Amino acid sequence: MENLENFKKAPETSSGGQSEISEKQDFLINNISYSQLRTFLTNSGEWQNNRLLGKYDNKVGVSGAVGTVLHTFVEQYLKFGGLEKAIEKAFSTIYNAENGLTYIVPISEIKNLENEIKTYKNNSEKVKNIKKSFDSGVANLFGVRAVDFGKTGSNEKLIKDVKTGVEAFLSENIDYGEVLEVEFAMETEVFEKLGGKTFVKSPVPFKAVTDEICRTTSTKTIMVDGAPEILDPGVLFLEDTKFKSSHSDMNAEDPKYIFQAFFNYYCVLNHFGEAPKYMIFREIKTSKNKDGSSQHQTITIPFFGKTFEEYKIYFWRYILESFERIKFIQERDFLFNIFDVYNGAQEWEKQKAYYLDVEVGQLKSRIAQTSKNRFSQNVPLMGDRDPLLKNAKNIGKDVEVEDLFSVENKIRNAFRNFGVLVNFEKKVEGYSFDQYLFSTARGITMGKVKMHLPEIIQALEVEKGIRIEAPVLGTKFIGVEIPREERRFAKLKKVTKSEKRPILPIGVGINGEIESIDLSDADSPHLIVAGQTGSGKSIFLESAIESLKDKGKLHLIDPKRVGLMNYKKIAESYDTLAQEVIVRLVYLLSEMNLVYDKLEEFGYKDIYEANQNLKGKNRFVSHFILIDELASITHDPDLGKEIMGQIGQLVNLGRAAGFHVILATQRPDIKVIPGNIKANISTRVCFSLATKVDSKVVIDEEGAEQLLGKGDMLFMNRGVKRLQGFYI
Ligand SMILES: Nc1ncnc2c1ncn2[C@@H]1O[C@H](COP(=O)(O)OP(=O)(O)OP(=O)(O)O)[C@@H](O)[C@H]1O
Ligand SMILES: [Mg+2]
């Protein structure tokens, strides 16, 4: 019980609700018994043979054969009572294949079988099958099994052992009470509530064959944990009988008994609608003790009490974890337990068959897969040390051996150093950067990833341009953006003239998608553009002019007299000085008020709704006010205050009247853009900025300090996205 603490917290498969319980999981198998579970865990190759391929070993050793025969004896004895009949039945098992009974034949007598089976002539199909099964050596037809006597065994010894086994069984007057069932096979889905709250369900139905299901008819004394316990009449209990040539060290805390008991417990509980109280494991030694002492040894597992509840947690935890492995192994190789290889030639033959019976093509892809998996698990392979990989190189070009120093491996190592296990998924090539997508290993939360981002970025030793999204918007991947050695730029594509709405393309995303905003949309009527010198603000304004020039009147405010000069001719107005700007804005605000008057008169919500009903000259016109370098016209405190007041009004009321403001500035701080204006413009284009703090001022998160200039931007509009701005 020493490790029980570790198992106390059972995994939760479902928190309640019947609907969740019925959720189906796909496993290779559709039920599981104790012995199958044991085979899976100790020898998955054998498990594959038995459970998936239906191949069983057709040979048993002498003690196995004796056990089978004695089980038949006990079954017959308890079912029908007559001792002689039972003995006869048991012995006939050795030679008779009848009613599907186990048919055990000593190997030395296989030749005699030819004569033997002549008696079954009337069923030629059956005879053929029996013969075939021996020929092929993979017999499981009609339960036919051959006894492998090895060097010392013989038919005489087998018969003698069965005789002493029967005597040993009878040497104790076992009080079975009322025997309800013998060798009873059950299969059932199992639900359990652990500790009264955690709901667990058997991944597939449990299966068990209980030797004896009994009810006490009078008081019965049993030994539990070394102390006698007296059972009243009417107690349901289970018996399991094992015949052995010598006693084993039986211990009630041995998980192998506990686990077997649990499979029996749940199956009986569900089939009888009543929980059994005890399971007694009885070991019967087939050879006599010299001092005449009992040949029986028992241990008892009680199905109640504190220890039982603890075992339950242990058991379920183990079952659920085992099924995680069964699920996992579906994509892998089933490995034989090589330490059992020399248990018999049979075993060795099986293993060879399994590993040699693979097509070369399959082998190639399997090796490729193996090497890929190794890399994704970050196991460095050192040239000659891994013959598998070396072979893989030789096999052919369809095997890709990844470069340990590839960007993706470097990234993965950087994450790993901070305890974040990630797997490379794919690389997407963008304009200014490539995006490397990673999935996280089980149990790694995005919170943990985020916690280490600054260190990880530093560890990657990329001078600039790196950014990590955890997760990438709308996915479960981590996106690592690494600057490209050769940048690509994005040329502006014309928005079609027939498009009436004021659509403004912003830039191109990593997957080549064009992000645009609709200025008539209530979510994005205005825009702030921020970025340090040379980052791309003026170019962005130029692309905006190109996109909007046919959609309304342009009012350009260009204090630096360079950026927008070229567009003077096509613009409705062009101003450079603060005083001019004030006059212009006074005019625009009065125009805006006129528009409001008209909208009110005709009962329209906004000009975009009105224009759907109006034609020609009656249509309302949009006004786009583009301001390059806001700070240059607002540094005079008085004029600045006046201008910011006017812009504030435009921003607050402009949209419905079709007045849209695009504000560009190098410095994004509160002195340049007052809080009330900033709060009303949630759509923002952020080019490269000097510091993380600046980045936070504009887009509420870090990252702009890593941007590469020349149109590399973070666009904020319901989330933040990295785009490449257009040039024209
Ligand atoms: N989208 C883009 N595609 C390609 N090159 C660009 C892009 N944007 C900017 N550039 C390059 O960067 C240079 C500087 O851009 P821009 O003049 O727009 O910077 P700015 O932010 O206005 O700087 P300042 O604050 O000094 O006016 C441009 O001359 C151009 O060469
Ligand atoms: Mg500029």
Image (spheres, rainbow, N blue to C red):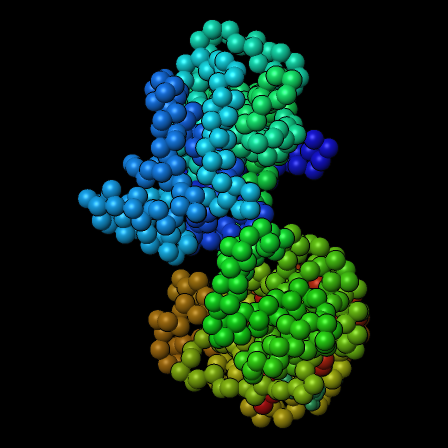
Q: Is residue 287 above or below residue 475?
A: above
Classify the position of the N terminus by image quarter.
top right
Q: Position of residue 620 (x, y in %)?
A: 44, 75
Q: Position of residue 98 (x, y in %)?
A: 30, 37
Q: Is residue 415 above or below residue 251?
A: below
Q: Is residue 726 above or below residue 106?
A: below
- Residue 253 seen in the current view: no
Q: Quadrant of residue 300?
A: top right
The residue positioned 77% from the left and 60% from the top of the image is 418
Q: Quadrant of residue 687?
A: bottom right
Closer to us: 110 or 168: 110
Q: Position of residue 336 (x, y in %)?
A: 56, 55
Closer to us: 288 or 640: 288
The residue positioned 69% from the left and 33% from the top of the image is 4
Q: Is residue 331 above or below residue 517?
A: above
Q: Quadrant of residue 471?
A: bottom right
The residue positioned 62% from the left and 34% from the top of the image is 255
Q: Quadrant of ligand 1?
A: bottom right
Classify the position of the C terminus by image quarter.
bottom right
Give the left or right position of residue 150, taking residue 489 as reference: left
Closer to us: 308 or 554: 308
The residue positioned 53% from the left and 33% from the top of the image is 260
- Residue 110 seen in the current view: yes
Q: Position of residue 221 (x, y in %)?
A: 56, 10
Closer to us: 682 or 285: 285
In the current view of this chain or complex, which residue is farthest to the left?
122
